[in-house]
């Protein structure tokens, strides 16, 4: 069985644009997905990355064109100027880790997708505890079970960020098939080729 380490942040529009396609692809190939929500705020300084607000104006402008192109190309609803972005991702990311621990990877992947939709298509604030709790409930997850995993989830979130740095991750989404790295949802075709090789 192929293993894919899936490094991401739930407030990344690029992760959102590729999420459902990646999940379907992994299932088609019977791959094991290892969820790795991580803190890009720690990854960027050691990898040459720059937070969006600090990027040159021309890079920020081009990003909006690309988001619109990819939104239309893959047919995923996305507001390129969402009401609640940028916001801190830690709460949502740790909740995804807790869901993975409490309910398993499939449930956590579905929950991650719901959080991304909330941010990028539904104008909801995924840094708000009440919003995250509502999405937990809508996904049929057990809030008490997730809460019981909160401390472990926080430790793992830090560990996943350390792992991202060790594996030379520098952006999101970032997929590692075996030991082969792929950056960006626009590399999913290559991810699938790697999965097909078995």
Image (tube, helix red, strand yellow):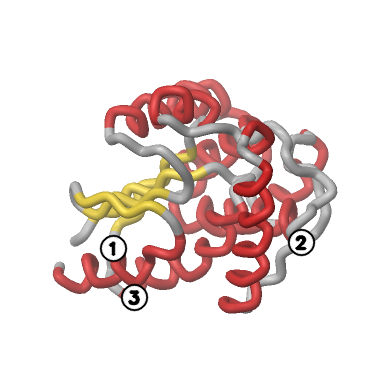
- One can see residue 140 in this view: no
Relative image position of residue 16 (x, y in whole percent): 58, 58
Task: Kindly identify which numbered label has been placed on residue 31.
Answer: 1
Q: Quadrant for residue 80, please give it.
A: bottom right
CB contact under 8 Å: marks 3 and 1: no
Coordinates of residue 69 in the picture (x, y in percent): 62, 71
Reading the image, the residue beneath label 2 is 79
Q: Is residue 94 above or below residue 75?
A: above
Q: Give the alpha-carbon distance from disc 2 to disc 1, as whole Å.
A: 31 Å
Label 2 environment density (alpha carbons within 10 Å; few <14, some 14–19, many ≥20):
some
Q: Earlier in the sequence, mark 2 or mark 3?
A: 3
Q: Image point 68% across, 35% down: which residue? A: 53
Label of residue 28 in the image: 3
Point out the image quarter for the C terminus.
bottom left
Depth check, mark 2 against mark 3: the one in front is 2
Q: CA distance from mark 2 to mark 3?
A: 29 Å
């Amino acid at each position: 069985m192929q293993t894919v380490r899936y490094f991401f942040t739930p407030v990344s529009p690029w992760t959102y644009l590729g999420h459902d396609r990646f999940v379907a692809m992994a299932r088609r190939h019977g791959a094991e997905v290892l969820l790795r929500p991580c803190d890009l705020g720690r990854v960027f300084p050691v990898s040459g990355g720059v937070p969006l607000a600090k990027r040159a104006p021309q890079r920020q402008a081009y990003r909006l064109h690309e988001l619109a192109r990819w939104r239309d190309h893959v047919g995923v609803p996305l507001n390129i100027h969402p009401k609640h972005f940028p916001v801190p991702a830690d709460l949502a990311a740790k909740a995804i880790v807790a869901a993975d621990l409490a309910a398993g990877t499939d449930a956590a992947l579905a929950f991650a997708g719901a959080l991304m939709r909330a941010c990028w298509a539904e104008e909801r604030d995924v840094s708000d505890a009440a919003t995250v709790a509502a999405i937990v409930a809508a996904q049929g997850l057990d809030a008490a079970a997730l809460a019981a995993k909160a401390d472990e989830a926080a430790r793992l979130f830090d560990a996943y960020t350390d792992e991202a740095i060790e594996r030379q991750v520098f952006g999101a989404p970032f997929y590692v098939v075996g030991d082969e790295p792929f950056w960006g949802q626009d590399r999913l075709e290559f991810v699938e080729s790697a999965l097909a090789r078995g």
